[in-house]
Image (spheres, coloured by chain):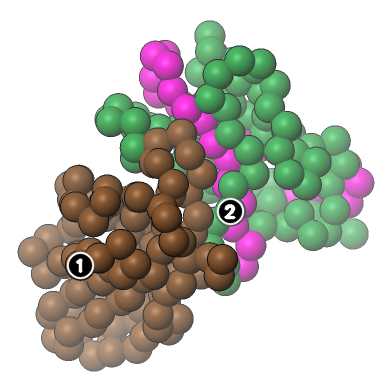
Chain colours: A brown, B green
């Protein structure tokens, strides 16, 4: 398997623009996680899905952020409108069963909002 | 919610020396514990995990960790480090719902020749 795939790897956008990050989890994994990594706040869980259903979105910072998982092989994280403080590396991870099972991380998307 | 404290933000060490990266977590109830490693410009990958059983857990690349319930610690050790071990290491604990992980702030291990 190719592992977790994220696109784009780098995104530079201007404040106020819409940004869409994409993730393809490992086939057969039932859990998908979106994380944000910054120097100030470290690695934060934004939202996770089980069988395409959002289970916990308590980490989503505000209404400007939304995430969807229309099918088992694709998820998006959207920021609209983007702000400079959204600049971070966003990781997607998938897991076979969640919890005690290993999470496999994608390479991340480095987002810069100017 | 659970919390994880990694006591050292950076640990410099010479090649072939032993190293210990410290991790403490907040709960005394049953938890799952993990160590992940992040190399520059990459995602995290699992080094090892503790679910139950033996308190000494062995992982990849010669790393091991010891679970200490009374001290709520899960320190990571390696008897002899290599330059290639230079990376950031994250301790994580499962949260109450059993599916989420709470990560520590990370420890940057710098191995010098």
Q: Residue at x 33, y 75 (%)?
A: A22
Q: Quadrant of the N terminus of chain B?
A: top left
Q: Residues within 10 Å of mark 1 (few under 14, many from 20)?
A: few
Dot 2, crowdedness within 10 Å: few (<14), some or many (≥20)? some
Q: Is residue B51 left or right of residue B27?
A: right
Which chain is disc 2 placed on? Answer: B
User: What residue do we see at 73% from left, 44% from top?
Assistant: B60
Q: Nearer the viewer, residue A33 or B107?
A: A33
Q: Say whether residue B78 is left or right of residue B90.
A: right
Q: Secondary structure at mark 1?
A: strand
Q: Residue at x 40, y 41 (%)?
A: A97
Q: Nearer the viewer, residue B49 or A41?
A: B49
Res. B20 visible in picture:
no
* Residue A111 in which image quadrant: bottom left
View extreme (front): residue: A28
- Say if residue A10 shows up in the picture: yes
Disc ID at residue B105: none
In contact (CB < 8 Å): disc 2 and disc 1: no
Chain containing mark 1: A
**Residue name at image x 47 percent, y 49 percent:** A103
The residue under label 2 is B45
Per the rendered image, the range of residues in magenta is B12-40
Residue A35, x across and y down, in percent: 35, 58
Q: What is the spatial separation of the Cα atoms under label 2 and label 1, in whole angstroms?
A: 26 Å
Residue A40: x, y in percent?
38, 58
Look at the image and say whether residue B18 sits in the magenta stretch: yes
């Amino acid at each position: 398997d190719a592992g977790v795939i994220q696109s784009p790897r780098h995104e530079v956008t201007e404040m106020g623009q819409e940004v869409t990050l994409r993730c393809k989890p490992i086939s057969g994994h039932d859990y998908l996680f979106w994380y944000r990594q910054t120097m100030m706040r470290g690695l934060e869980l934004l939202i996770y899905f089980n069988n395409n259903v959002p289970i916990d979105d308590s980490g989503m910072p505000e209404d400007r952020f939304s995430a969807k998982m229309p099918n088992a092989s694709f998820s998006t994280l959207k920021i609209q409108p983007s702000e400079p403080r959204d600049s971070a590396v966003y990781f997607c991870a998938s897991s076979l069963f969640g919890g005690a099972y290993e999470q496999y991380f994608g390479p991340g998307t480095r987002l810069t909002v100017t | 919610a659970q919390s994880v404290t990694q006591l050292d933000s950076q640990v410099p060490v010479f090649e072939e020396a032993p190293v210990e990266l410290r991790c403490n977590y907040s709960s005394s109830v049953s938890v799952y514990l993990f160590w992940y490693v992040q190399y520059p410009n990459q995602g995290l990958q699992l080094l090892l995990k503790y679910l139950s059983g033996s308190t000494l857990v062995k992982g990849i690349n010669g790393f091991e960790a010891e679970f200490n319930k009374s001290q709520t610690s899960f320190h990571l050790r390696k008897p002899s480090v290599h330059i290639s071990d230079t990376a950031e290491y994250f301790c994580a604990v499962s949260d109450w719902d059993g599916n989420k992980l709470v990560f520590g702030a990370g420890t940057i291990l710098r191995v010098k020749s």
